[in-house]
Each structure stands twice: as C-alpha cells, then as structure tokens.
Image (cartoon, coloured by chain):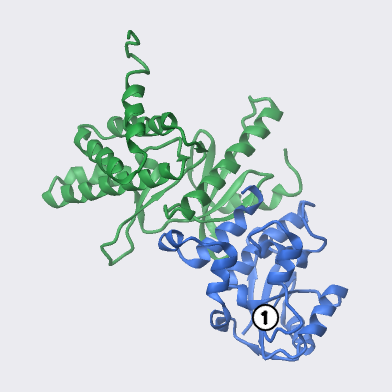
Amino acid sequence: MTSAGNLPIMELLSKAELLKQGAEARIYKTLFLGRPTIVKERFQKRYRLPLLEEKLTHRRTVQEVRSILRCRRAGISAPVVYFVDYTSHCIFLEEIQDSSTVRDHIASTRWSASSVSDVSLECLAQMMGSTLAKMHDEDVIHGDLTTSNMLLRRPAGHGECELVLIDFGLSSISALPEDKGVDLYVLEKAFLSTHPNTEALFQKILKTYAASSKKSAAVLKKLDEVRLRGRKRSMVG
Amino acid sequence: MHLSHELELFPNLNVTQILFKDVKNAAELRQNAVEGTITGALINPTMLVSPFQVLVAANKAVHLNKTGKMKTRSLFSEIIFNLSPTNNISEAFKRFGISDGDDSVLVVLVHNKEESQLVTDITAKVDGQQVPLDDLSSLSDHAKIKKLYKITPQEEKCGTLLDAVVCRMATKDVM
C-alpha cells in the first residue's frame, strides 16, 4: 500500500527514534513542527486480507483520534493530536514530557516502602478513580486500561501531578454499564497481575470511582457480574 | 521579524509567516488573493493563537496536496480551510480569511528556497507595517476563538487554548 504520499513519512520515521513496538503499532519520537512529538504508526498485518486490513486499521486510527478529542473536551488529559495521516495510519501526538507510566511509578514507589510513598499511592488511586469516572460519564470506553496506558505528569518544581490517559486504539463510545464494567474489569486484571498485593489500592480506585461518577452503581454491579464470568470461573448459576 | 519553518515531513519546503499591522489595502489584497496574483494565504490574525496553529494547518495542506486529497482548490485556500474547526469551506474563508475592512493581515508563504526575496515582494504589496510574529498574541481575540472553536471550560484546565484549537484542527475530518 505504498503511494507517493507515504514516502515523506517513511523518510521521517527512518530518522526518528523508535521507542516501542507493540502488537499493532510502532511508537517513534521525533520533532514535528518544532515540537517534541510521538508518532504512532499502525503497521500492516500482511496475514490479513488487504481489504479487511485497511478497514480495521483505519477504524482503529479514527477511533483513537475521536476518543482523544472527546476526552479532552470533558477535561480528561490525553495527548494533543497534531496531525493524522490516514494513508499510512500514523498519528502525530504531543509528547508528554516529565512523566512516567503509572506502572513504573507504582513499582518504584513500592520498592522504597516509606510512609511518604504510601500517601502518594493513595493520591494516585484517587486520581485514577475520578479520571475513569469522568471518562465513563462521557461514555468513552478506553478498551485497554492498564497502568502502562496511564502517565503521571509532574511538571518540575510544582507538587501538582496530572494523570494522562494514552493509547485509545481499542476505544469506543458506549453508554452501557456492561461496557464500562468490562473496561474496569480489564484494568483490575491488569492491575492485580502487574502489581502484586495491591487489592486495597484497587479498592480505593473503585471507591473514588463510585463517589465521582453519577452512574457508578450500575457499572459496579456489572463489574461484579463480569468477575463471575471469564476463565476458570464456574458459570453454574 | 518573519518566521520561517522547514516542514519536517517535506524538508525541501518552508513555511514563512509575515505579520502586518495598520493595513490600509485589505480589500485590494483580498482581491489579489482571489485572482491568484498573491502566491500566499492571507489570514485574519485575530483568529490565531500562535504561529504553531498556522504550521499545523500548512503541514496538513501540503500533505493533502501531495496525496491529491485537498478539499479546496488551491494550497493556500486549503491552509485557510484547515484552520477552521468545521468542514464548511465558505465559513472557513469568512472567518479565517481577510475581509475588506481588516487592518491586520498574516501572510503565509510556502516555498522551497531562501525567503528574503519573497518577503520583500510581499511587503511591497501590503500597504501596512510589518511587525514581529511575537505581536500575534496581542492581536488574538481569545474570546472569539473560544466561541468559534467551542472550547469547553473543562478543556481549558487540561491544556492551553492552543492545544484545544490544534486538536480540533487535526481531528475535524472524523468528528
């Protein structure tokens, strides 16, 4: 699927720094219009039928971009979109500087095991709960909630930390408590498997979620139901 | 004074922005733009938050031009169209293009060489005072911009006005 339009991007990416390669996309770091930028390139899956491949990749790109704007309009931090190239499925996003993933933050905080760090985790749990509540109240389903998809931005000097959500590739719009419950379930599984012995912390997230969202009761009820499904769960009712 | 930026995606192309105040011949300039005798985009600077906003619009215009997917008829009208948060072309020209009574103009040139001659040529056509690009912030009408781009109050807490504007410009095709 190469056309004349793709060459400039390929040129730029060949000189850019590759940060990560996931199952779906490569993440590059570069300068764009003078600003530090992340380029997310959804590459081709050649094992897929070309027509399906194009439709799917395009749809993922579009959903990602739509959800980011929707979140930002509601006051949820997500990277600013600078440019989207629909021919090569590349999204040019603001590079969130002075930040670390929530995953790294929790891991490093728990290593130091001092009382100060525990307070910080409390705060983090509250931020996560309230941000997710706001997101679900906007009917945005993230689709891939993990602590690696949340960044903690701490501008140098101030105490004010900010939670930034990233990677909206699997996101969708839905008002259904079921979908929101599943979204939280995905986070719970990812959270507890990545960070052992954090059940209390996750409960704190849910508690803040419940307090912050107007529609939380139905969602949390669904979460309980969803937990009873899944692998190695008895569906005997 | 003027600002020139080489597009990272199109390294042989530069975008040059020149700002003018106390412009007396806006009507004539607008006519020239329509006729095509000015090879640049003439933009109403009160709708601009920052030169970065123009770069985003210009980059997208060049990209769409190269891939044959422009929505308007020329590169310069495409730059103006890309500034708009909506997909209505005539509304974009009305809001972001210059009007006959305007007293300030931002000229945007896209070129592949050293710009000093081009700047001189344009400056000769504008009956006004060239001022540094930094003056743009004093011309921005933030209230008008917020209203046109429909910026929510919550959004202003998670980013700057420029962030909100650029994000809408970049995503409007799929919203």
Q: Is residue A79 visible?
A: no
The chain painted blue is: B
Foreground pick, B86 / A175: A175
The spot of residue A28 in percent (x, y) is 52, 49
Residue A187 in the figure: left or right of residue B101: left
Return the residue at label 1.
Answer: B18
Q: Residue furthest top?
A: A236
Decide: is A85 above or below B122: above
Decide: is B80 above or below A121: below
The N terminus of chain B lies in which quarter of the figure? bottom right
Foreground pick, A71 / A25: A71
The spot of residue A169 in percent (x, y) is 52, 39
Foreground pick, A3 / A232: A232
User: Mark 1: few, some, or many residues within 10 Å (few <14, many ≥20)?
Assistant: many
The spot of residue A177 in percent (x, y) is 41, 32
Q: Is residue B147 visible?
A: yes
**What element does badge 1 sit on?**
strand
Name the residue at 51% across, 49% down: A70
Q: Residue furthest left?
A: A115
Q: Quadrant of residue B78?
A: bottom right
Name the residue at 86% across, 77% down: B37
Decide: is A3 above or below A195: below
The spot of residue A190 in percent (x, y) is 34, 32
Numbered-mark total: 1
Chain A color in figure: green
Name the residue at 64% across, 81% down: B2
Name the residue at 25% across, 37% down: A202
Chain bearing tag 1 is B
Q: Which amino acid lies under the numbered mark 1 shown in the image of this protein?
A: Ile
Foreground pick, A33 / A145: A145
Q: Quadrant of residue B75?
A: bottom right
